[in-house]
Image (cartoon, grey):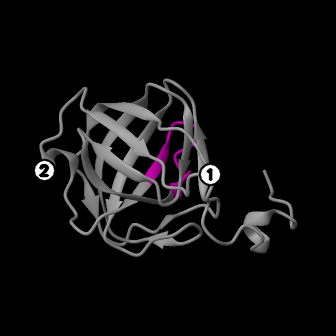
């Protein structure tokens, strides 16, 4: 579907951080990944947020690059496929935790694999795959919202 020339994400009207209260989506690992790559050319959509539904599957990847919505990620390590156990919003800058340990913050979203899944790219200084990190099935993921309380 073509985007409108008035889309606020394309015109820059939505520039600046998303600073709105939102919930804490949770998920569980359903597949541990062991892939990484250079020269990937993962295009991040310009949107800073995506809604997720309960039972939706997403892929988690980490990059050491200063990635942002609308940019491209060349180097990444893939952590896992996760199933959201509660719906909610994923927003650039939100903190991602696995088993209570912070792994980084959401950098953006690649939707090339849709409708199968979306890839949530997380900024992290250390690149290591899910298998290298020792993740297991049923490990828990929490997306911690970052916003100024009202």
Residue shown at the point (60%, 61%) measured from the top left: 45
Q: Position of residue 42 (x, y in %)?
A: 47, 64
Q: Nearer the viewer, residue 94 or 75?
A: 94
Q: Nearer the viewer, mark 2 or mark 1?
A: 1
113 falls in the magenta region: yes
Q: Nearer the viewer, residue 57 or 50?
A: 50
Q: Position of residue 44 (x, y in %)?
A: 54, 63
- Is 91 placed above or below 25 here? below
Q: Which image quadrant is residue 148 in? A: bottom right
The reply to whether the magenta stretch includes residue 48 is no
**Which label is found at residue 132?**
2
Callout 2 touching callout 1 (CB < 8 Å): no
The alpha-carbon separation of the residues under discs 2 and 1 comes to 40 Å
Q: Position of residue 72 (x, y in %)?
A: 49, 71
Q: Is residue 144 left or right of residue 43?
A: left
Between residue 14 and residue 7, name the one nearer to us.
Answer: 14
Looking at the rendered structure, the secondary structure element under dot 1 is loop
The magenta stretch spans which residues? 109-120
Q: Residue 76: x percent and y percent?
A: 32, 63
**Mark 1 = which residue?**
150
**Foreground pick, 105 / 39:** 105
Secondary structure of the residue carrying numbered label 2: helix
Q: Is residue 12 left or right of residue 73?
A: right
Please tell me how crowded label 1 is: few (under 14), some (14-19), or many (20+) other residues with Cα within 10 Å: few
Residue 34: in sight, yes or no? no
Please determine whether, in this image, residue 137 is positioned above or below residue 40: above
The extreme front residue here reads 150
Which residue is drawn at the image coordinates 39% and 53% (left, top)?
Answer: 95
State the image quarter where residue 31 is shown: top left
The answer to whether 74 appears left or right of 79 in the picture is: right
The structure residue drawn at horizontal position 37% and vertical position 39%, both measured from the top left corner, is: 142
């Amino acid at each position: 579907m073509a985007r409108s020339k008035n889309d606020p994400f394309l015109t820059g009207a939505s520039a600046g951080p998303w600073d709105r209260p939102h919930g804490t989506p949770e998920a569980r690992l359903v597949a541990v990944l062991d892939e990484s790559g250079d020269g990937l050319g993962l295009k991040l959509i310009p949107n800073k947020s995506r809604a997720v539904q309960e039972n939706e599957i997403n892929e988690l990847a980490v990059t050491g690059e200063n990635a942002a919505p609308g940019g491209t990620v060349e180097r990444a390590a893939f952590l896992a496929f996760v199933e959201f156990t509660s719906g909610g919003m994923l927003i650039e800058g939100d903190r991602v935790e696995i088993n209570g340990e912070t792994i980084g913050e959401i950098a953006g979203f690649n939707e090339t694999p849709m409708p199968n899944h979306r890839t949530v790219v997380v900024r992290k200084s250390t690149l290591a795959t899910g298998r290298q990190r020792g993740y297991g099935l049923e490990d828990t993921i929490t997306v911690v919202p970052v916003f100024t309380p009202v």
